[in-house]
Amino acid sequence: MRLNWHDYSYYPYERELAVREAAALFGGPDLREIPSGLEVTGGKGAKAAERLTYFAGGENGRGPMETLQSRLECTVRTSRPRQATRYSVHGLHEYKGKFNPQVAKALLNIFEIAPGRRVFDPFCGSGTTLVECAHAGVLGHGVDLNPFAVFLTNAKLQALVTPVAHLRADLRRLSSSPTFRRSVSVDENARIRYLRPWFTPKMLDMIETIRIAVEGAAGPSAPVFLAIASNLLRDYSLQDPKDLRTRRRRTPMPRTPFPEAFTTACERFFDRLESAQAVLGTCLPQGSAKRCDARCPAPDAGPFDAAITSPPYAMALPYIDTQRLSLVWLGLLEPDGIRSLESELIGSREFGGAARRTVTDALQENADGLPDAEAAFCRRLQDALSEQDGFRRKALPVLLYRYFALMRDSFRATRSVMRKDAPFALIVGRNHTVLGGIRYDIDTPSHLAALAAQTGWKLKELMPLQTYRRYGYHVSNAVRAETLVVLANP
Ligand SMILES: C[S@@+](CC[C@H](N)C(=O)[O-])C[C@H]1O[C@@H](n2cnc3c(N)ncnc32)[C@H](O)[C@@H]1O
């Protein structure tokens, strides 16, 4: 059988994953690279080929075939030959730090996760892994501490199993409901007091009207509609939508009235979803996400056959800032809960006062019992600080120590819900910092591997993903090189 590449250009790691996928799905065939793709001799038949990620299709004795991935990507292709990443429900909402869906799908194949098996994502974010699990007939379970991430993931999973005809009918009912265009006057409460400075009075009335109408008319698909509206929220607010922090906007507001923009966004999403449902159907296993700390996964979870995640970064972007309006507007968090959510997240920089002093003491004595090399590295950074370092840099060694300790706890918790021998894949980038005028590279993937080993995981491999770029990051913050860390539960 011949397998053909897609027409877009590939990063070297994608070709590497492509060959591994083919080897796993075909069950030990002879593989020979040819200019158009791969020649496969022996192993299992063409059915397995349908599940490949990095091939458009192939030809065997019985004629040509197309992969499901190619059919999905074609539904959102533009004229430029580029890998599409917003197919199916992936484009429902922006989420900073969202990872590449093809990698998640390829890993499911490489780990030979057959339909009906169970996969865990301890930092599920906006649900990329769980969506790819559903596409592959796999039951995905995720946790995230951020209620907005949990909301988005569940909205995507709900959309996948809701026939688009139902969503269109809901939208018609919604647009014709008397409340949709008639502004409500909003009751004063903590939620509204938080939102008021960030919207014109007319806009605040309008978004509240739409929220109330959706909650009244859309039944179980309400989260899908609310996610679509939430994706427009910052554009229609007085915050600068391009700023990662909450600063007031200097750019003009969009001209299209919000209800029209919302209806258009719904229709665009439904068109994509409809094309995806034509490929996948709607009878997919419905995984779910729960709000939970990855350091203590829900007791009813597991055992899982694999875990796939992109964990938080050692010094994460302040992405809660870009989600504040949605968190409060959707009623997912009281306004006074934002700061504590920020400080609880692993990798957060928003962490000060007494808690910071406690961790500073812990760092000196390695009170958390981190592996010697990781504790020594944090102390080395601490010793390298000089007067010329600003307060953010001064905080770095302590933040890194805390990150290591919390990630180590999450490795322990994840291991407790995995089957024996189950693989755990993490995609994570390296960092660097300049302290006292000297550059220090922070090899986060290797540190994480050491922390995982301390909790009993076995390192299988570290594979560089050369020019992997997360979509969703602002370009200046884009993480350019990441590493795939693969662990196994011995
Ligand atoms: C890099 S993002 C994951 C992105 C995800 N793979 C996607 O495609 O959307 C890391 C996630 O870890 C979550 N997180 C941080 N600390 C956590 C904790 N203690 N428990 C669970 N989730 C946490 C953050 O809320 C964030 O959603």
Image: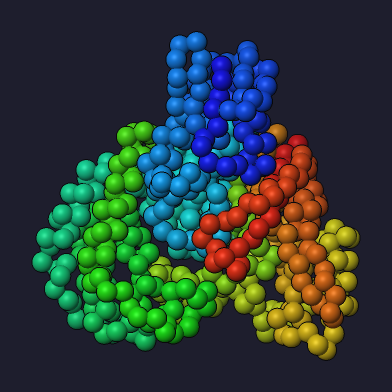
Residue 171, relative to residue 287: is it above or below?
below
Instruction: Residue at 51%, 37% (x, y): give it.
Output: 7
Residue 149, relative to residue 132: is it above or below?
below
* x and y percentages locating residue 401 in the rendered image: 77, 68
Instruction: Residue at 68%, 53% (x, y): give it.
Output: 482
Residue 134, relative to residue 197: is it above or below?
above
Q: Is residue 357 left or right of residue 187?
A: right
* x and y percentages locating residue 246 in the rendered image: 48, 80
Looking at the rendered image, the quarter that the C terminus falls into is: top right
Q: Is residue 382 left or right of residue 66?
A: right
**From where the camera sits, is residue 194 visible?**
no
Q: Quadrant of ligand 1?
A: bottom right
Q: Is residue 225 left or right of residue 43?
A: left
- The image quadrant of residue 313 is bottom right
- The image quadrant of residue 480 is bottom right
Which sits in the foreground, 56 or 408? 56
- The image quadrant of residue 418 is top right
**From where the camera sits, is residue 342 visible?**
yes
Residue 219, relative to residue 459: is it above or below?
below
Instruction: Residue at 36%, 78% (x, y): give it.
Output: 237
Instruction: Residue at 85%, 85% (x, y): give it.
Output: 386
Which sits in the foreground, 201 or 79? 79
Q: In the displayed orientation, state which residue is furthest to the bottom.
A: 387
Looking at the rendered image, the quarter that the N terminus falls into is: top right
* x and y percentages locating residue 365 in the rendered image: 87, 72
